[in-house]
Image: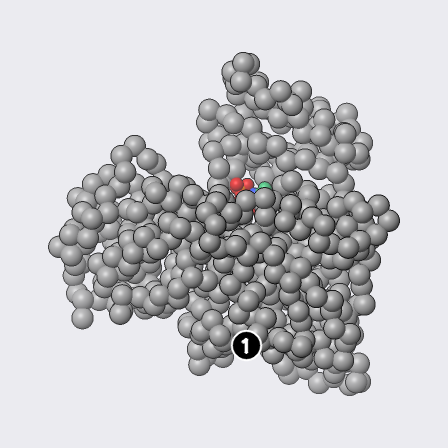
Amino acid sequence: MQTDLPEEVLREYSEKHKKPESVNFAYGTAGFRTLGERLDSVMFRMGVLAGLRSKALGGKTIGVMVTASHNPEADNGVKLVDPMGEMLEQSWESYATYLANAETTDEFITNVQAVIYRGGISISQPANVVYARDTRPSGAALVAALEDGLKAIGVEGGGWNAGVTTTPVLHYLVRTTNTKGTPEDYGEPSEEGYYSKLAAALKALLSGKPSPPPLIVDCANGVGALSVAAFSKHVEGVFQFQPTNTDLQTPGLLNFKAGADFVKTSQSIPPALQGKLSAGQRAASFDGDADRLMYFYLDDQTSQFRMLDGDKIAALVAGHLVELVNAAGLAGRIELGVVQTAYANGSSTKFLEKRLPVKCVPTGVKHLHHAAEAFGIGVYFEANGHGTVVFSKETLALLNSHQPSTPEQTKATEDLIQLTKLINSAVGDALSDLLLVEVVLASKGYTATQWNSSYSDLPNRLVKVLVPDRSLYKTTDAERKLTEPVGLQEKIDALVAQYEAGRSFVRASGTEDAVRVYAEAGTREAADELAFKVAGLVYDEAGGDPAKRPKEFI
Ligand SMILES: CC(=O)N[C@H]1[C@@H](OP(=O)(O)O)O[C@H](CO)[C@@H](O)[C@@H]1O
Ligand SMILES: [Mg+2]
């Protein structure tokens, strides 16, 4: 049994993974994320931190995911996953940044000791870690650095390598490992267990309903291609995928003009799908680590591209859950709610607020997830397609003990129970969310057009502004208002007031060195104009170089 910090071992390994000079790392909304070639020392140190986190929790299994999600192929990143499959607790994010930025091995050891002291960690506790990576070319070497960290801190068996898989699978493995044999048992802790669980729930939910049409899925040339291929085998004859953008060999293709982020930001169809979609036929896009989902189709009348984003998914799913809860005879006994961020389309918020409680929280899945847990059933989605549904313990217990009094109530209760299995409540999950959408559409007999007709999105525009110091931008009211720089919000308000149905807000990105400007308004032209006016205002107020001022800024 380990009783002291294995300082010599740590020192030896740390010398093999030196921090690059003059780089400052920050554990942000999505963990560490930058060029893959810069991350060797960070990976090693996150191996050590994952071990410490596990020891701090008495040996519970901690997850480590090596991915940069929708970022370009040359980037990579790492995030730690807490025992129930949720994001790393906030106080530990600062430990991560603290360890990552130690300039030397000596400083690193000192910082490790400080973390042990501050976290009240008993080093003699066991440590268990499961880790995985996406398909990025830099991933294998970075995992080797991570493994050195796990060994150095004494993780049992050097950790469990789950190989190349999606972010949601890794979260599932963490949760199932930690709940095995407990009342909160979440399934078999294996990738096969994950596919089997989803497949069984899907079959139960689709039974007696018309089969959904084969679905084109854009896998962003990333790891989602592997999970779609593996899952397809479990649902033969029940559900058919037509995977595209599945090239994992050709360099440079990951997320390139493909995937959920491309669809959301360009508001257009990925080029590889052009000519493949017939009018009205729906298709879906995953992002590079398969935790985000976007749907789209071409209008039956005009062949125009129509996007069904996270807000539309939330509206569809929440509406269906409300109906099921009512049909099960459980109205008033389960509180349903939706959680959004300021980026949710104003029309979606209006639509939802008429039907159920809606909460707005700051950007970042951990905020959404946490707020959703306050509801009996909490539906949360970011507009970019990252989200899921969480069920409280009380709701799960109620569903399992409920005595329906009519066949309709029995059916609705069974469907709700199956949905708790189909949905990956640990984290946003493109595959599980896709199946959820398909089940809801099949239940309602809806086409993409019918789904889209629930409300019309307000035209919107998202613009990035490069400023010398984004840390100067402080917000309040779930990021919808700036408190600093002082006076800027009033100027934004004055611009917004000129537009019908206008809304705009400004905040510093947590993942990029930029400030984001969001605007929406009654027409496309007005939304663009408002966004570029606010962007110009932010740029000028920050003292931006007039010679470098982007020409679209007004
Ligand atoms: C406008 C937007 O899409 N922001 C994204 C982006 O955060 P920023 O803090 O805006 O850079 O990355 C986050 C992590 O993936 C995601 O949670 C969030 O929704
Ligand atoms: Mg992602």
Which of these two is toward me, 296 or 149? 296
**Residue 369 percent location from the top left of the image:** 56, 57
- Is residue 159 left or right of 67 when viewed as pictured? left
**Residue 133 percent location from the top left of the image:** 41, 58
Mark 1 = which residue?
196
Quarter placement of the C terminus: top right
Give the residue type that dot 1 points to. Answer: Ser
> Which quadrant of the figure has residue 489?
top right
Few, some or many C-alpha atoms within 10 Å of disc 1 (few <14, some 14-19, many ≥20)? some
Please tell me which residue is depicted at 44% across the width and 77% down the height of the picture: 180
Please tell me which residue is depicted at 48% across the width and 37% down the height of the picture: 512
Secondary structure of the residue carrying tag 1 is helix
In the image as oriented, which residue stretches furthest toward the left? 8
Determine if residue 454 is in view. Answer: no
Please tell me whether residue 104 is drawn above or below residue 543 in the rendered image: below
Please tell me which residue is depicted at 50% across the width and 58% down the height of the picture: 223
Which of these two is toward me, 14 or 143? 143
